[in-house]
Image: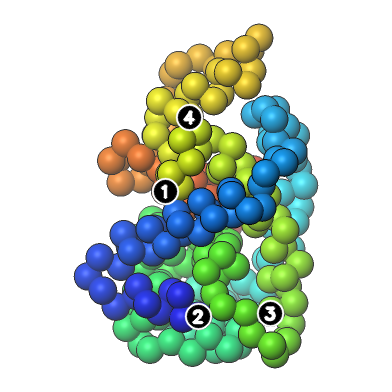
Amino acid sequence: MGVIMSCIGKSSKNTCLDDKIERKIVEMRRYKFGQSKLKSVDSIVMMFPMFKERLKTLRGMFEQYDEDSNGSIEPNELKKFLEHLDLHLKEQEIENLFEYCDLDGSKGIQFNEFIVLLCLIHLLAEPSSSVNSSKAGLEQVGEIFNTIVEAFVFFDQNGDGKLNKKDMIRTLNETNPRERSPARISKHRFQEMDWDKNGQVTFREFLFGFINWVGIEADE
């Protein structure tokens, strides 16, 4: 997990990780999504049931490492999970990664945030040759994570690895000219994702919002 480790531990760890994810998405846009199958918002919405079904398969993995069955992964449980993936991080690195994925600040990674964590690992972690059940489970949803990245790229009109409200509203309207989204709905969707209210949506914020759109709740 060297790519992530190079960020974690710095004072601007969130910004640093966001920057690395942005660069990864820009790279994937250039080399992987040249012929995207996503041509409209409807083409994304139609896949929501598939997203929900596939992402829900991660519930078993989540419950396996939620050892006290309290509905969230605590730092000590996260440490065991990362070690099982052969990702051996320092205590401070685990703490920072935990804070990065604990989007609601509840001091525990709930199931929807656990999906964010897995997608982050999928995008940035260096592959390992060893295989175990957790890695196998993560590999099975790898293409789903790639498709979610592709959906993000669809909204990322200027290709800089983050979203702004103007681009998102334009995309919603231009790809559905006969059924334009009311401005209040588009604005609400954007506000749902813009957790820090800075007028931009990072992939981490988009992913958390997207999981909610698909219909996966923290306690589902």
Please report contact status of discs 3 and 4: CB closer than 8 Å, yes or no: no
Disc nearest the viewer among 3 and 4: 4
Decide which of tag 2 and tag 3 comes sooner along the chain. Answer: 2
Decide which of tag 3 and tag 4 comes sooner along the chain. Answer: 3
Residue type marked 4:
Met
Secondary element under disc 4, as helix, strand or loop, is helix
C-alpha separation, residue under disc 4 versus residue under disc 2: 32 Å
Residue assigned mark 4: 168
Q: Quadrant of residue 114?
A: bottom right
Decide which of tag 1 and tag 3 comes sooner along the chain. Answer: 3
> Is the residue marked by circle 3 packed among few (<14), some (14-19), or many (20+) residues within 10 Å?
some
Decide which of tag 4 and tag 2 comes sooner along the chain. Answer: 2
Residue assigned mark 2: 1
Decide which of tag 2 and tag 1 comes sooner along the chain. Answer: 2
Total labels drawn: 4
Residue type marked 1:
Thr
C-alpha separation, residue under disc 1 versus residue under disc 3: 27 Å
Decide which of tag 4 and tag 1 comes sooner along the chain. Answer: 4
Task: Give the percent coordinates (x, y) of residue 216.
Answer: 62, 50
Residue assigned mark 1: 202
> Is the residue marked by circle 4 packed among few (<14), some (14-19), or many (20+) residues within 10 Å?
many
Circle number at residue 134: 3
